[in-house]
Image (spheres, rainbow, N blue to C red):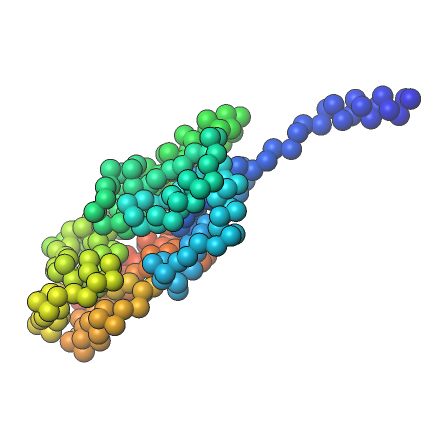
Amino acid sequence: MRFVVILTVLLAGISPIHAAIPIVAAENFYGGVAGQIGGDQVSITSILTNPDQDPHLFTVNTDTARAVSGAAIVIESGIDYDPWMEQLDSAHPNPDRVSITVASLVGAKEGDNPHIWYRPDTMPALAHKLADVLSKRDPAHAAYFQSRLTAFLATLQPVNARIATVKARFGGTDVLATEPVFGYMAGALGFKMHDMGFQNHVMNNVEPTARETEEFESLLRGHKVKVLFYNGQASDPVASRMQDIAKAAGVPVVGVTETEPAGTTYASWMLSQLDEVEKALAP
């Protein structure tokens, strides 16, 4: 009897184990930010993680559906970039789940360039939203989430500083891209992007018009642009031919990706690509 009493007292003093909040992000750069805000109080599942995979060819499977059905928070980019995520969310309803559409946080709408993670204001907006959602779900760790928010925002300061440096040095530079992946960042850098019609057609798997193709080639062969950006994750014959033309004409080619490379953070990923841009444009 004495043993039972002692055991009961001991068990009464044991705090219940705190379960990590499950978060599912459609893309790994959003999942990475969620991990930086949530720390050890969250568990992260990112769906698109392979920087060598074409995101446009992704198809869902049972593992993806299972992850979404068990999530407390889901994050999607929106504006038709990852419509499969919204479909999975709707197919597995949960009144307690919080669904975050990142596009809505920055006022992006249907028809806009969907690669919104290259906008400098996107990740701060998502980070603030996550800190708020997590604090409401787990008030006991609200201060923890807020401190991690502050730390995350600090990691973006070098990115913003580099953007300012490149813009001051190369703002107004004429550039081209096979797809509008880097479009928002190019705008933040003050570049003049040409031939958007060609880019949008390639992005949507539509053959560019003869006039668009001719203009694109002319800009490269005539050295009227200083750099060509291309999507390193998507293989398109027309885009590949433009890369060949650019290299033959001596126009620097910079590859960008739609998925965050393994072993990086959002900030280090952006800084790496800005390094490549600066090297391509440097005398």
Q: Is residue 151 visible?
A: no
Residue at x 43%, y 34% (from the top left corner) = 98
Q: How far from the left and from the top, in percent, is residue 166?
A: 21, 54
Q: How far from the left and from the top, in percent, is residue 214?
A: 9, 70
Classify the position of the C terminus by image quarter: bottom left
Q: Is residue 125 visible?
A: yes
Residue at x 39%, y 63% (from the top left corner) = 53
Classify the position of the N terminus by image quarter: top right
Q: Is residue 26 left or right of residue 44?
A: left
The mark tally for this picture is 0
Residue at x 12%, y 71% (from the top left corner) = 217
Residue at x 41%, y 30% (from the top left corner) = 132
Q: How far from the left and from the top, in percent, is residue 137?
A: 49, 28
Q: How far from the left and from the top, in percent, is residue 252?
A: 21, 69
Indicate whether 112 appears above or below 72. below
Extreme bottom residue here?
248
Instruction: Compare residues 49 and 74 and report the one nearer the observer.
Output: 74
